[in-house]
Image (cartoon, rainbow, N blue to C red):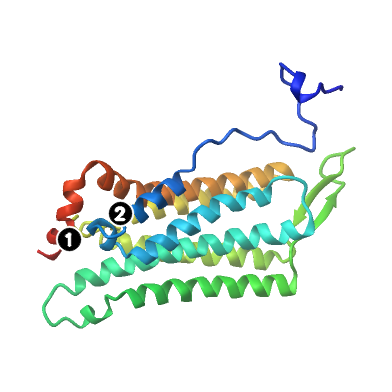
Amino acid sequence: MNIPPPDHSEGCFTCPSEEWPDEKKVKCMTIFSLVIFIYYWYTPVVKANNRTVSFILLTSILLSFLCVFLFLGRPVDITCMLRQVSFGVFFSISVSCVLAKTVTVCLAFKATKPGSYWRNLVTIKLSNALVFTCSSVQVVICVIWLSVSPPYKEYDTFSSPGKIIIQCNEGSVIGFYSVLGYMGFLAAVSFLLAFMVRTLPDGFNEAKYITFSMLVFCSVWIAMIPAYLSTRGKYMVAVEIFAILSSSAGLLGCIFFPKCFIMLFETEKNTNRLTSCRK
């Protein structure tokens, strides 16, 4: 089929079988939330939720969105290796930050009594150490996976008669599901801890937002596994892209949009929030 030059084309044409059309994207809500948090860096609503961990979480969510581009286009060996490792590491950092926030909330309410031992543990160093440790475990898993049996490009000549499908082979199946399993383990722990403290007072408690975000996150990836195993070729990639975008949007929307709403439209709560937390 002859395709007219772009400058003279006024209609639509069917994309070639090896290409997928893209959608016009004009906004990035992750960057919008990141700018708001930086602008209100010294306000109580940002300080009360560990600014450093929040910044790391927003950055990792942004990188999770961007790693989708590694799944698009013609697969090559380097993109096959990078796309699984990148989403695994970025998501582990995100969930580690959520876990650190959840642990901080749990310890903060245990430390309300004067002279409580838990008061000494509610520190920024603990949150940062938890994020670093949990993320490092996933990095080690990915390094072992890439060292033993990394993903690679392969030609599938059996799935569709008369067609050769270029796709990524995950290499070690154990490595791939170890990355997913560890990420799921972090999400499950965060969900259980947040669920336990979801009914605590709202002045300092963001556990209910974490609970819902982890519920969305876990639901997406649990539904993704059977769908991923039952598809082939570009449909398998589409399923994984959908899971990445949906879970990233769930984390962003459930945790940060309520805070952005307070900072933009309910400034009186932002002013008095720290005082109400201490009472």
Gap between marks 2 and 1 measured at Cα: 14 Å
Q: Is residue 56 above or below residue 3?
A: below
The residue type indicated by label 1 comes to Leu
The residue type indicated by label 2 comes to Tyr
Say which residue appears at 19% left-offset and 75% top-offset.
111
Residue 33 horizontal/vertical position (percent): 39, 49
Q: Quadrant of the C terminus?
A: bottom left
Say which residue appears at 65% left-offset and 35% top-offset.
22
Say which residue appears at 65% left-offset and 63% top-offset.
176
Q: For residue 211, say whether it is visible.
A: no
On the image, numbered disc 1 is attached to which residue? Answer: 274
Q: Quadrant of the N terminus?
A: top right
Q: Where, by quadrant of the figure, is residue 153 drawn?
A: bottom right
Q: Is residue 136 above or below residue 266?
A: below
Q: Foreground: 269 or 212?
A: 269
Labels 2 and 1: the sequence-earlier one: 2
Residue 257 horizontal/vertical position (percent): 35, 46
Residue 274 horizontal/vertical position (percent): 17, 60
Apparent side of residue 81 relative to residue 208 in the rendered image (left or right): right
Apparent side of residue 267 relative to residue 159 in the rendered image (left or right): left
Q: Foreground: 157 or 81?
A: 81
The kind of secondary structure element at disc 2 is loop
Q: For residue 141, say whether it is visible.
A: yes
The residue furthest top is 10
On the image, numbered disc 2 is attached to which residue? Answer: 40
Q: Residues within 10 Å of mark 2 (few under 14, many from 20)?
A: some
